[in-house]
Image (cartoon, rainbow, N blue to C red):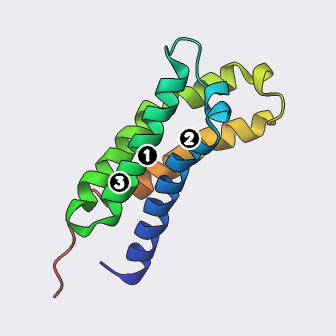
Amino acid sequence: MNTVKLGLKYLLGVAFVLAGINHFRTPDFYIRIMPDYIPAHALMVYLSGVTEILAGLLLLIPKTRRWGAWAIVAHLLVFFPVHIWMIQKADRYSDVPLWGLWARLAFQFVFLAWAGWYTRPDEPHP
């Protein structure tokens, strides 16, 4: 794995671990953005924090990198509706400009491509 790809892998893994930890530090922030149709908001926030931490750690470990990358992809896809929900209910999030909600949604595609990069086997060195 080249140096840039390796560095970006660590950046993504650490970002997911820190984001997961943040679910435990500031759960009210995440509870506030949970769609009404999802039950047990607090439990789901903590559960999603655990899955983010685990996915990030799996990505950081060379032998489990691909599992971690797929876990991050799955996590992003599962929570994609939350971003759509926030746009649909933008009046609830007046502290965030509408363009910011759209940018947040668009950035999910960047994260998907980034994590997807690590789902492939490493190229053998010539």
Mark 1 nearby-residue class (10 Å; few <14, some 14–19, many ≥20)? many
Foreground: 87 or 72?
72
Q: Is 53 above or below relative to 97? A: below
Query: Disc 2 to disc 3, how far (Cα)?
Result: 24 Å
Disc 3 secondary structure class: helix
User: Which of marks 3 and 2 precedes in the sequence?
Assistant: 2
User: Which of marks 1 and 2 precedes in the sequence?
Assistant: 2
Q: Nearer the viewer, mark 2 or mark 3?
A: 2
Quarter that holds the C terminus: bottom left
Q: Is 18 above or below relative to 31? A: below
Q: Residue at x 56, y 27 (%)?
A: 82
Q: Quadrant of residue 9?
A: bottom left
| Location of mark 1 (residue) | 52
- What amino acid type should be assigned to the residue bearing mark 3? Gly
Disc 1 secondary structure class: helix
Quarter that holds the N terminus: bottom left
Foreground: 61 or 111?
61
Residue 8, position in %: x, y?
A: 46, 70
For the residues labelled 2 and 1, say whether their Cβ atoms are less than 8 Å apart.
Answer: yes
Query: Disc 3 to disc 1, how far (Cα)?
Result: 16 Å
| Location of mark 3 (residue) | 116
- What amino acid type should be assigned to the residue bearing mark 2? His
In the image, taking residue 45 as reference, residue 73 lies left or right, namely left
Residue 58, position in %: x, y?
A: 30, 57
